[in-house]
Image (tube, rainbow, N blue to C red):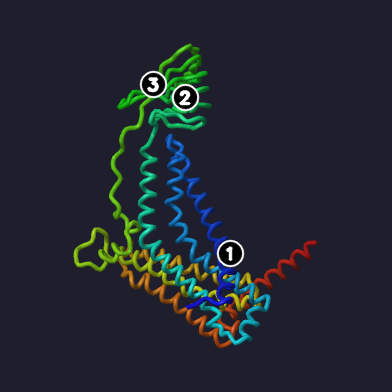
Amino acid sequence: MILTTLDRYLLRRTLTPMSAVLISTMVAFLMERLMRSFQLLSQTTDGFKLLTELMVNLVPHYVGLTLPGGFFIGLFVVVNGLNKSSEIDAILASGISLGRFATPFVGLGVVLMLFSVALFGFIQPYSRYAYHAVLHAAANAGWNGDVRPKALLSAGPDVILTADSADASGRHLEHVFIRKIGPEGREDVLTAASADVLKAPGDQKATLVLNHGRQVSTTRQAEVYVADFAAFRFDLPVSQAAKLLRLRGDEVSELTLIELAQQGFGKSPPTLPRQTLLAELFSRSSRALMLPLLPLLAVPFGLSAKRAGSGSAMVIGGLLLFAFETSMILGQAMVTAANVPAIATIGAPAGLFAAACVATWMASRKRPGQNPVSWLSERLAEVFTAIAKAMGRRQALRE
């Protein structure tokens, strides 16, 4: 199909709010996940490198998570804006049908569906495994003998080390602080003006030569001992090679669509439960296939918002999308817990959502703006209005 001027105009209006929602939501999700990982990453000298790798590997997951909502909001915003400015009235009056008006939106949904198949089917499984690999590396990295300035390092099971400054090699430190808890409960706090890290290749420990410092020791009986020193040698363990990470494929989320289909429908016994594999396959396919159907729901929502208000229409749309996503997660949980057939727990909710989209669109084609969505939006708007009036009267009586 050759894009007309109207098609390009509608797509340009849609991409702006859709991109804004995707970027803002994805950044919020990334920050929340990374904040939970900071404690683990702070225990290794490769924290920044691992943090960058975590962000890169989390992007495909959150793009797939926010894409349906961002697409729907983008469609709703553009249709509602055109409806309020009466541009839709002019477009329909010029002889363009409602179906032709929605064609570029459906085409964009098909493009996003193909992108989602590649994302859910092939990119995301590898990125999820890479994400677990980074967490595995961070958990087993420990301290390798290098110190970065102002980094709080766990240099052993009960030892914390930090320094205000360090040279490029991380071996000469300034203003050092060390806290160690002994097995008998004794706490040793050492501070030093400077220190040098001595470590030979292959050694299982590093030696800190502390210069011009003080040691404060507190016993379990609250006895305190203070000693100043000109030079003090302090041995610390360094991390050794960790055990290998498991192979990819031990979790269904790490399998591609092809691998899920081969194991789910294959004759040979799969390594994971067959219905669990099929549930993951159907769930990913449903999330991708629903994208071309969202315009059939968003366009009637945008048309009905002029009468009922955009707030109630957006609430209904959000609830429907939330119900669809929740049904996919609940369906997978039921398959795992009770071994219910995946076609019932995943296919049935997906079919109901598709039927709701098509039914809403068919009703809207006869009388644009008059459909089950508009009726429900108007009833919801009336409820919100009644609540607002009741709260206003109550406030007035208090005054």
| Element type at mark 3 | strand
Marks 2/3: CA–CA distance: 16 Å
At horizontal 33% and vertical 23% (from top left) the residue drawn is: 200
Q: Is residue 144 visible?
A: yes
Q: Amino acid at mark 1?
A: Thr
* Quarter of the image where the C terminus is located: bottom right
Quick one: SS at disc 2? strand
Q: What label sits on residue 178 in the rendered view?
A: 2
Q: Is residue 56 left or right of residue 70?
A: left
Where is residue 149? Give x, y as percent. Answer: 50, 30
Q: Return the mark for residue 16.
A: 1
Kind of residue indicated by mark 3: Leu
Q: Nearer the viewer, mark 2 or mark 3?
A: 3
User: In terms of sequence position, does the residue under pointer 3 or pointer 1 come before the other?
Assistant: 1
The quarter of the displayed image where residue 156 is located = top left
Residue 234 lies, in percent from the top left, at 40, 19
Q: Position of residue 14 (x, y in %)?
A: 57, 69
Please tell me which residue lies in front, 374 or 248.
248
Look at mark 3 in the image and give the residue it sits on: 198
Direction left: furthest residue: 268
Q: Amino acid at mark 2?
A: Ile
For the residues labelled 2 and 1, the Cα–Cα distance comes to: 52 Å
Nearer to us: label 3 or label 1: 1
The answer to which of 280 and 78 lies nearer the viewer is 78
